[in-house]
Amino acid sequence: MMKSRIDARFAALKAEDRAAFVAYVMAGDPNRATALEILKGLPAAGADLIELGFPFSDPMAEGPPIQKAAQRALKDGMTLKGVLDLAAEFRQGDDTTPLIMMGYLNPLVTWGFEAFAQAAAQAGIDGLIIVDCPPEEADPLADALDAADISLIRLATPTTDDKRLPVVLRRTSGFVYYVSVTGVTGAKEADAEAVRPAVARIRAASGLPVAVGFGIRTPERAGAIAQVADAAVVGSALVDEVAEALERNEDVTARVLSKVESLAKAVRSARTAALPA
């Protein structure tokens, strides 16, 4: 069996001794056409992996920026099927960039796990992050994803202790997403030195790459995280660019991709910059 896109991308980056830059965008924000433009432009702007949020009316882990992004997408008519259609269009021009969907359980329950997993695989989805699915209740979803060769990527947090960690990691593949701060997205800043021991502990326990997200908004912060983790994930700072561009009547796609370029550059150069002269 060929390696998944996620495994292949992290292996390639490890060989280069650099972390991945992971860009999170909300599918359908601010509208379908613009969201597709942004999605297609992310790899060239420096995104090594893409997290594609699917809008949900009652998110529990999102701060105001991503909540508003979901509301804009829903208002424009984006659906879960529409997210998969976007992914499929992206895949027509890019067969290598890992694409991970991120969202909540209710829409998947409504669709049906097996049917959703098959549709996601056909659309070119590589991984799935479901924020509100406890590991104790994840087996039916994990079974469906395994059958479709899609990774179930789980979240670990600062409160995940050594007793809880094996439960969280069970049936996790692709990478582990470490939530660097307690609270919702976009509310606090991640501290690289505080994150370092947790990343090492999770990497040792899982044997998987560890991506750090929540609380990374600037190139400086992304670069610092890239020195200690296998990937830095940025979401709220990107959807903020959508909102700012709309407010100022600017080109949304250009503004978002410019932000991605600055963040990706910091991540790509982080370990080289950290080397002693």
Image (cartoon, rainbow, N blue to C red):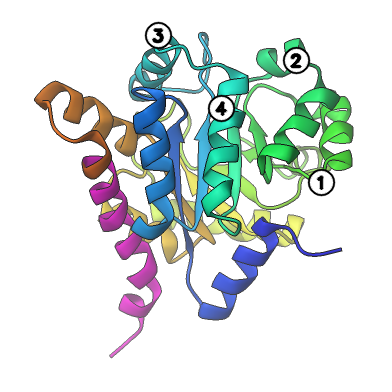
Spatial CA span between label 3 and label 4: 14 Å
From the image, tell me which residue sits under label 2: 111
The image position of residue 85, as x and y in percent, is 58, 30
From the image, tell me which residue sits under label 1: 149
Which badge, 2 or 3, comes first in the chain's sequence? 3
**Amino acid type of the residue tagged 4 in the rendering:** Val
Task: For label 1, count other residues whose C-alpha is less than 10 Å away and answer few (under 14), some (14-19) or many (20+).
Answer: some
Which badge, 2 or 1, comes first in the chain's sequence? 2
From the image, tell me which residue sits under label 3: 75
**Amino acid type of the residue tagged 1 in the rendering:** Asp
Look at the image and give the residue range highlighted in magenta: 255-277
**Amino acid type of the residue tagged 2 in the rendering:** Trp
The image position of residue 253, as x and y in percent, is 27, 39
Residue drawn at (55%, 57%), measured in percent from left and top?
197
Find out whether the residues at labels 2 and 3 contact each other: C-beta distance under 8 Å: no
Majority secondary structure of magenta residues: helix
Task: For label 2, count other residues whose C-alpha is less than 10 Å away and answer few (under 14), some (14-19) or many (20+).
Answer: few
Residue drawn at (37%, 40%), measured in percent from left and top?
37
The image position of residue 167, as x and y in percent, is 81, 38
Residue drawn at (65%, 56%), measured in percent from left and top?
6
Question: Horizontal placement of 271 versus 141: left or right?
Answer: left
Find out whether the residues at labels 3 and 1 contact each other: C-beta distance under 8 Å: no
Which badge, 3 or 4, comes first in the chain's sequence? 3
Query: Which quadrant: the N terminus?
Result: bottom right
Residue 270 is at least partly visible in this image: yes
Q: Nearer the viewer, residue 157 or 207?
A: 207
Which badge, 1 or 4, comes first in the chain's sequence? 4
Q: Secondary structure at mark 2?
A: helix
Find out whether the residues at labels 1 and 4 contact each other: C-beta distance under 8 Å: no
Q: Nearer the viewer, residue 213 or 66?
A: 66
Find out whether the residues at labels 3 and 4 contact each other: C-beta distance under 8 Å: no
